[in-house]
Image (spheres, rainbow, N blue to C red):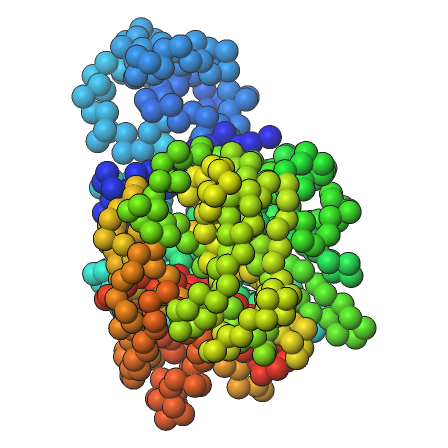
Amino acid sequence: MALNIETFKNADLSAGWRPGNNPGGQTLFKALGHPATVPAARRLVEKLEKSEPLAIFDPTGAIGNFNAFFDLGNCKVAHYFVQRIEDLSTSFQGVQAEPISHVEALTGGTLFAIAYDWEKQFGPILHLIPDSVEVVSLDAMRLPDDMLTDPSNYLAPLNFATNFALLRDVTSTPSPQLHSKVTTANYWGLHGAPSAEMYLHLFDADGNTLAEWREPLGQPGALFAVDSQDVRQRFELGDFCGSLFMHAVGIAGHDIVKYALDVYGDDGRALSCNHDANAWPADFYAGLPAPKNGEKLTLFIQNSHPAPIPAGSVGINLMGSDSGGRLDQAVGPFATYELDVSTLVPDARWPAQLEIDAGRHFVRPRYECVQVKGNDVRRRLAHANVERTDLTPDPYIPQLGDTMGKGYIMPLPLPPIDQFSTHALPTPMARSQQELPLKIDLIDAGGETLASKFLGRVARHESACISLDDWIKEDGITLPSGHGHLEFLYDFRDGGEADGWLHALGRFEQRGSGHVSETIFGAHIFNTPTIYKDEPQSYINRPPGLTTRLFLRLADGQVPGRDVDTLCHLIYPSSLPWHATSSTTLILHNRNGEPVAEQQLTIACGGSRFWTYHEVFGESERRQAGSGAYIVIRDPTCRLFGYHGLLNGQDSFCLDHMFGF
């Protein structure tokens, strides 16, 4: 059962994009479900349940959002008023809508207005409400002004820059100790926010509050990190695995909380890195790979709302099939449930793909795969991705080649082939996608396309997994640079349809250790002067936005006693010929956000570059940067796509895509 809330709406960015206002995000559900307002919301509902007669005024059709979180089923609703004439055909709890002009007929009781900034927004109609009627509004569950960036407009997107992270710290089990770390930077300060803060609320697996606190984000550009070990010590906690709710306050420029999540164990065999979780709970997620024999796959269901997830509301099935099962138990408000995927799809095996029916109950979920080979127990954590429900095939995409060259490109790294094996798997990521007409190109770091494989019209239920080892061996391919990248591209030689939401998963295995890492992302149009809808995209500008600013967090104690290095794989995809080489600057910052060193990189157009922190920056520069350092990757000439990770010698590694701001 899907939760009746509005969380995300696709938007045409070219129609009204501006920094700090993501037009696709819906703010109301964030405001209603904010953990700090839940006690006040429940007191409000208790008051409404005792109010007779009770009238509701719903000016924007938001009653479903409120009712989904805070059940009004015990309220005795006598009148349901609306403002929009087109809403007169609606009803709530069997009470037919009336125009708000009828409010004058009330003779007492309570009027519940589903609105924030009540008097400011609806002052012109207050004289219509009889003095005998008590008015209550959503302002009764409002955050204090010191938690708002713009107190004058409660639902302003910058007031609700929120996100969830999975935070875990386990030391009391027989297995190696497990920890986690959330890392970001005060990029809001770089956009002019003078004193940004982070409100943090940690829930345990049952949804109970373990800790609630606020921290300054430091000077502009300063590193900000939340380490589970520090949290455990600070609040004197035991083992925990739950949700960390994050709310950036007093910000500017961005209404999204972006972060990198590291999960690590003391023995180095649980090394993983993840992108942030997305702030908008979706109906469906895809890109969840089935386990191999001998692996255990766990999906972390982090209820992102103050209402329980009813039993039977979450399901998993094989992609392109209705076969699967549903979770037969409820998950409490803000609770985290560890679902053994094999209990719902017991026969699913790699390279099969799984689809998650999430019903808007939780943000983009993490999954953990535990691989056991004798005494060698390895863990990897990765995330599924949002499966769009609002897309249909775009008949214009097959014609884009005339003006957009390659058009949409889904780039995946091909790290040094002597150290890593690589598998690439296209993943359906929209409910309407019944096929993917594809080819895959293998490109050396120098930009030369070495081989191309036409995959045909890949059906939704197929798993067209490409082993790079097999491809290289069968075709006798030699990579001059020893590394490069892959590009999934639409190919309509046999017809087919596309929607632009092309995704693919990369699975990488370290040859020396057998450690595995996975990442998934979607296609974009890169480095063209022309614009199609909202492509080429940019983090800081409207399309075409042909510049790069990427954040690279560095290794910082993830494996005790080991000098773990940071890896980065930058790709310069180009839909049309662009600058022959990039003009890329790597700017090393200390934990306060102060630049301490720079290095230049050039990447061939259509090529890539795999590098490590220790390779590019010398020991004296690394010493000057110190603990908590990070790198900003800047290029004013082109849009680069990046992957980052950690390299623990030949014992383990991790890899995921990067983010920018």
Direction right: furthest residue: 374
Q: Nearer the viewer, residue 92 or 628?
A: 628
Location of residue 254 in the rendering, given as x and y in whole percent from the top left corner: 30, 54
Q: Nearer the viewer, residue 634 or 64?
A: 634
Q: Residue at x 33, y 38 (%)?
A: 11
Above-or-below relation of 425 to 587: above
Direction bottom: furthest residue: 620
Q: Residue at x 38, y 90 (%)?
A: 618
Above-or-below relation of 591 to 436: below
Q: Is residue 526 left or right of residue 615?
A: left
Q: Nearer the viewer, residue 503 or 398?
A: 398
Q: Residue at x 30, y 38 (%)?
A: 12
Residue 326 can be seen, yes or no = no
Q: Quadrant of residue 448?
A: bottom left
Q: How many numbered marks does the figure carry?
A: 0
Q: Quadrant of the N terminus?
A: top right
Residue 60 can be seen, yes or no = yes
Q: Residue at x 45, y 71 (%)?
A: 444
Q: Nearer the viewer, residue 396 or 40?
A: 396
Location of residue 162 in the rendering, given as x and y in whole percent from the top left corner: 40, 50
Direction left: furthest residue: 124
Q: Is residue 637 left or right of residue 281?
A: left
Above-or-below relation of 367 to 8: below
Location of residue 399 in the rendering, given as x and y in whole percent from the top left corner: 35, 40
Q: Quadrant of the C terminus?
A: bottom left
